[in-house]
Every structure is written in C-alpha cells, then in structure tokens.
Amino acid sequence: MDDDEEASRRTFELLANETRLGIISTLGEASGEGGYATLAFSDLQAATGVEDNGHFNYHLTKLVGEFIEEREGGYALTLAGIRAYQAIVAYRVTPEVEIEPFEFPHKESCVQCGGTIVARYTDGRFITECEECGTEELNYPVSVADFDPNDPESLLDAATRRMIRDESSMYNGVCPYCAGRVVWTVELPEGHWEESNLRGDAMAHGACTRCAWFLYGNVVGKIRHHPAISDFLSRHGYDPWTDPPWEEQYDFDHQVLDDDPVRVEVSYLADGECLEVTVDSDLVVLNYDIRLIEE
C-alpha cells in the first residue's frame, strides 16, 4: 500500500462513525453565508444530539487536527472538514428520480437514422438518444438537487451548467471533482472510439491523474474554452460559457495535418469569417489565425 492509499484508508476510518459524521454535519449546518460556524463544546454536543459526554468527547477528539480545529470560542471545520461536509451534503440519499423521455428541443434529428432525439433522466444521469434507433448522444451525471423533477426544462439548464463547468475546468487542467491534474491526449485512430458512438478523424480525451474522471469528444468542442476561440464564437453569437454545448450556432471542420508529431487543424466558420486553430497531441493550441471566407 503506497502513501496515498494509506492516507485514503485512514481518512475513511476516521469518518466511518455516525457520531463523527454527525459532528461534521452539525458544524456545517450551523454555518451561514458569512462563514463557517464556531460552536462551543456544549452547544456542539447538544446540536449533535449525543448525551454521553465521554462518548462525544472521544469522537470529537478523533476529528480534531484533521477535520476540526479548536479555536477561541469552540470548534470549527478545517478545510478538510469543509470538504467532508460538502461530500455528505452532496451524496445524501435522495428519492430515486426518473424523468420519462421528452422531445429534446435543441437537436433536429439523429445523425445515424434521422429519427427524433429525446432526453430523459435516470440513475442520476442526463441522457439524450434517438427515439427510433436508440443511438445515445449524451450521457452525463447531473445531481437531482440541481433541477426540479417536475420541470424537464430545468434539467436541460442543470445539464448545461454542469457540462460547462466540467469541460472548462478539465480543459484548464484541473479536475472539477478532486482537483487533480488533468492530462489531455488527441487520438487519431477512429476505432478507438467505436464504443462511444463518436466519429471523426481526431478525438480529444482528458483524464484526471488522481481520480480517473474523464471526458472525451471531438477536438472541435473540447477546445472552445480557449480564450481566442471563446472570443471568436462569442462575437458570432455563441457563448461557450453560458450557451448549451449542444447548441452549436456555427459551422466547423477539422483535418489531421500530420500524425508524427500530431497536428490537427480545427476551423470555426461564422458570418463570413474563419478561425483556424492548430493543436498538438496534448490538445495544446499552437497557433491560430482569423481570415475572411472567400465567396
């Protein structure tokens, strides 16, 4: 067992107790918009609901140093304690939510068969797929806390926010879930993507080196949060920071210029202008240029 595994095991052992989780939750729930709360021993014990002084003090002591700090006036969450509280809140058991398929208003037809695209929510995931052939286009985790189960449109808004947050963070090299380092690669062989229903000569794959969370897709979409690209698209009516990823209000193309070293040229076309971008095997933008499109 390496040092990281040992630290993870110790963390779970420290938190694997109902009283300790209750103490962390109590401190978190007592906090307000102005900051995280500091509670005196007696107030913290009463709010946690533990009557036995010795039992409560034992478990509180186990948390002090890593998840809780003792300060003037009582006890407060450390940064690790705040993260633990956030995880408790985020993953509390909630009633199972299912949203039956409804027409997806932002996609004309299935690229495979021309059928109608529908959206649904199941097992914590936002899914879009063809009603006729079943081809899945999107499958992405969205917390039920982010939308109203009785309002399908709110699901689309929640999915938009989550996907933009994740893609922009991943593109900038930071995992949105564990803050680990993200490594991007550009894959050229189409066969690498057969199981994903994705097609194209160049696909981008970003993976966290810590928790293994990953994103993949066409190079065109994965680099649109680069400053030069987002600025170009925004000037032409599409804002990558707010508009749904599936509402691409521009034409695009890409071609492989070289495979050793990998060089891929991506073109964004809108309103008589073309932004040409060259990326390498690590999805790094090497250069870009804007030119007028000749009619």
Image: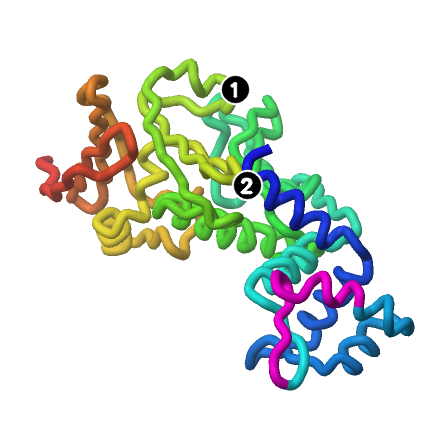
Q: Please state which amino acid type lies under the numbered disc 1.
A: Glu
Which mark, residue 4?
2
Identify the residue shown where x is 80% and y is 70%.
Answer: 57
Task: Give the quadrant of residue 198.
Answer: top left
Magenta region includes residue 71: yes
For the residue pair 32 and 294, the one nearer the viewer reads as 32
For the residue pair 106 and 24, the one nearer the viewer reads as 24
Q: Position of residue 13 (x, y in %)?
A: 72, 48
Q: Which residue is mark 1?
A: 195
- The quadrant the C terminus occupies is top left
- The quadrant the N terminus occupies is top right
In this rendering, would 87 be left or right of 170?
Answer: right
Q: Position of residue 233 (x, y in %)?
A: 27, 49
What range of the chain is rendered magenta?
A: 58-72
Tell me the SS state at disc 1: helix
Q: Please state which amino acid type lies under the numbered disc 2.
A: Asp
- Outermost residue on the right side: it is 51
Q: Residues within 10 Å of mark 1 (few under 14, many from 20)?
A: few
Task: Give the quadrant of residue 145.
Answer: bottom right
Separation of residues labelled 2 and 1 (CA atoms): 32 Å
